[in-house]
Amino acid sequence: MLAMTLLTLLSWALAATTAQAATQTISKTFGPIKIGGYEVRQENSIGVPTPGVDGYITDMRVNVVDKRGKPLPISRVMLHHVVFLNAGSPARPRTDKTCSQFTLWDSRSRLPALAERFYAAGEERAEMRLPAGYGYPVARDDTWFLVWMLMNHRQLPDQAYIKYDMTVETADPLQEVTPYWLDVNNCLVDPIYNIPGGGRPGALDRRSAEWTIPTAGRLVAGTGHVHGGGRDLTVTEPTCGDREIARFQPTWGQATHPFYNVRPILHEPGPINVTAMTSPTGVPLAANSKLRLTSTYDGVLPHTRVMGISVVYVAPDPTVTEPCGALPLDVSYSGRPPGRPTPPRFTVPLTGIDPDSGRAITIQAPPGRRVALRSGATVKIKGFNFSKRNIVLRRGSRLRWDFDDDGTIHNVTLASGPIGFGSENLDRGSFTQRFSKAGTYRIFCALHPVAMTESVVVR
């Protein structure tokens, strides 16, 4: 009898040990990534470490760390954004669900979308967090890719690693989810757009895009990503009276938050948090249902190179046949941390290099005399330089920038001024802007914001 009891207890202990081992926390790092002084570096990376197991990811989060695994403060290196893509395995190749091809950094090269965007994060450090019983399936022989952008806020070159922690279920099968990448400027490696501003107090800028969900399922989770000036992201069903099924709300740091005090300032600060949605029951989506993502920003001030992105996770369910079925009662959102609920007014300055110390300093205009140009004049971009750095134009004039810098990609972006605008990332070709409002336009290349600056005064 005693032997049987001991055997029973031993079997229970082994079962408990097996159950505990079935849920693993797996950490991986990608790097080292070397970043020059004051550099904004962005790349597409192949052969990224995967979990290396067969199972299901139920939770995922990311950070930027040093070689010892310690998080790097943004006073050194800032994670602007990172996107994880999964090409799958030979037995189960994966393709993106909302794009057939991707346009690359140079805004003209294209590749087939032979990898699935399944998780992303930015300054707000969004997490993938699925309800109990659901998981994103992975295989030990999957191939992963990364699209990332890091910013070095120091004069000296630095080194960083992208570290990602995953909770993976490797024993019991879970209800698998399919990620759908919703983006108002979709299928671009750099899916930015620009908000001109100039609206009356309270004005909002809204951009929307729609997708068809081909197979029946239930939307069980989602996250969102916005930039400076963002108000919210909503997911609605246009064929169901445009009813709202998810809303992602950003929270902004207080004036004392590091986002607003790091130097040099290389872009308008983003939020410190965006709410995430979960629903164990899931929002029912019949086959061929449509989803609409609406990205809402402040429309009073200019906001350049912004994004409006949501990743939603849909669990296949062939029993969902009724269009516009009843919404679940168990939808919940992650909490909002202390901070400001609406985006603060923020002016991005121009940054230059002090000739004596070599350090980044705030400047009103780049060095050099100001020249008057006629409408239609051309500025050449070459040698990491604008050929004319201080310009006077008459209101209504057009200015053209020609890109030709030995294959190096640049852009033309408003830092501050009356109207927001920004070009595509280009290594050749041209961009033209009409200046319809008087004032001072401070301009930089957002990829080389310290090295390449320009000032245009419109009278």
Image: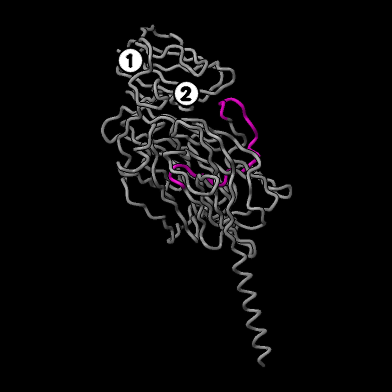
Residue 47, position as x, y percentages in the image: 66, 42
Residue 395, position as x, y percentages in the image: 32, 13
How far apart are labels 2 and 1 at the CA level?
19 Å
What residue would you read off at disc 1?
Answer: 457
Residue with the most extreme bottom position: 1
Q: In front here: 178 or 55?
A: 55
Task: Tell me, for residue 269, which label it has, or none.
Answer: none
Disc 1: CA contacts within 10 A as few (<14), some (14-19) or many (>=20): many
Residue 340 magenta: no
Residue 93, position as x, y percentages in the image: 69, 46
Q: In terms of secondary structure, where does tag 1 sit? A: strand
Mark 2 vs mark 1: in front: 1
What residue would you read off at disc 2?
Answer: 423
Residue 320, picture quadrant: bottom right
- x 59%, y 35%: residue: 44
Residue with the most extreme front position: 356
Residue with the most extreme right position: 90
Asked if 178 appears above or below 5 in the picture, the reply is above
Residue 16, position as x, y percentages in the image: 60, 73
**Three-letter amino acid code of the residue under disc 1:** Val
**Three-letter amino acid code of the residue under disc 2:** Ser
Residues in magenta? 105-125
Q: In front here: 240 or 17?
A: 17
Asked if 365 appears above or below 319 in the picture, the reply is above
